[in-house]
Amino acid sequence: MRGEQSLEQFERGGLEVLDADLASFTERLIQENHTLKRSLTDPRLFSGIGNAYSDEILHRAKLSPIKHTRRLSEEEIQRLFDATRAVLVEWTERLGARVERRFPREGDRVREEMAVHGKFGKPCLVCGTPVQRIRYADNETNYCPRCQTDGKLLADRALSRLLKQDWPKSIDELTWS
């Protein structure tokens, strides 16, 4: 029909995780060997997982955002699958209830209920360790070094290059003023 636009033109082909089983999730996940963060936020691989939700998913799954997809064990893939589904269902329900009360506004992307996203320097809701971040381009990745990286601090490209050998390697080396 002329004049009607189809949403199909915007479809990227990403897997709808809530409609998927573990086997199809795994196949899509290891299709390319990227970091978990990159894979989860790639709309050609997974539909509907943006920057904020990927941080929350990885925290819930207790996985490093920079771990490569083809290096995951079966148990880690299962945890990731379960966490992805749980976070998406949880936030769909929360946001649905919120929309019923009021229309979303600018600034609603960072939500106080989130465990790590947008929480740089604030205590992790699980262990109390200050949430860390990696900045890149216009994005950032937020993570808990105790829950997700065994205490290891992940290098922020710009800052770690500037500090070189002074860049702390673990959360225990980091001093907070």
Image (cartoon, helix red, strand yellow):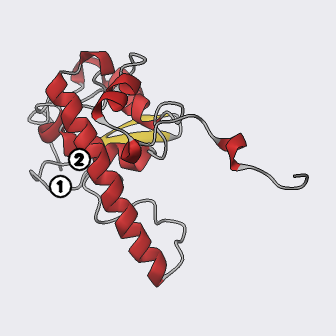
Residue at the spot 52% in from the left edge and 36% down from the top edge: 43
The residue where tag 1 is placed is 123
Who is closer to the viewer here, 89 or 117?
A: 89
Check disc 2 and report its element: helix, strand or loop.
Answer: loop
User: Looking at the image, do the residues carrying marks 2 and 1 touch, with CB atoms under 8 Å apart?
Assistant: yes
Judge from the rendering whether residue 27 lies leftward or rightward of residue 64; answer left or right: right
Q: CA distance from mark 2 to mark 1?
A: 6 Å
In the rendered image, the vertical position of residue 109 relative to residue 127, given as above or below: below
Residue at the spot 8% in from the left edge and 35% down from the top edge: 172
Q: Badge 1 local density, few (<14 within 10 Å), some, or many (20+)? A: some
Who is closer to the viewer here, 50 or 116?
A: 50
Q: Badge 2 local density, few (<14 within 10 Å), some, or many (20+)? A: many
Find residue 163 and report its horizontal and vertical position in percent: 31, 24
Who is closer to the viewer here, 170 or 125?
A: 125
The residue where tag 2 is placed is 131
Find residue 52 and report its horizontal and vertical position in percent: 40, 49
Q: Is residue 132 visible?
A: no
Mark identifier at residue 87: none
In the rendered image, the vertical position of residue 102 relative to residue 144, given as above or below: below
Judge from the rendering whether residue 107 lies leftward or rightward of residue 173; answer left or right: right
Residue at the spot 27% in from the left edge and 52% down from the top edge: 86
Residue at the spot 30% in from the left edge and 52% down from the top edge: 87
Q: How many numbered marks does the figure carry? A: 2
Check disc 1 and report its element: helix, strand or loop.
Answer: loop
Judge from the rendering whether residue 25 lies leftward or rightward of residue 3; answer left or right: left
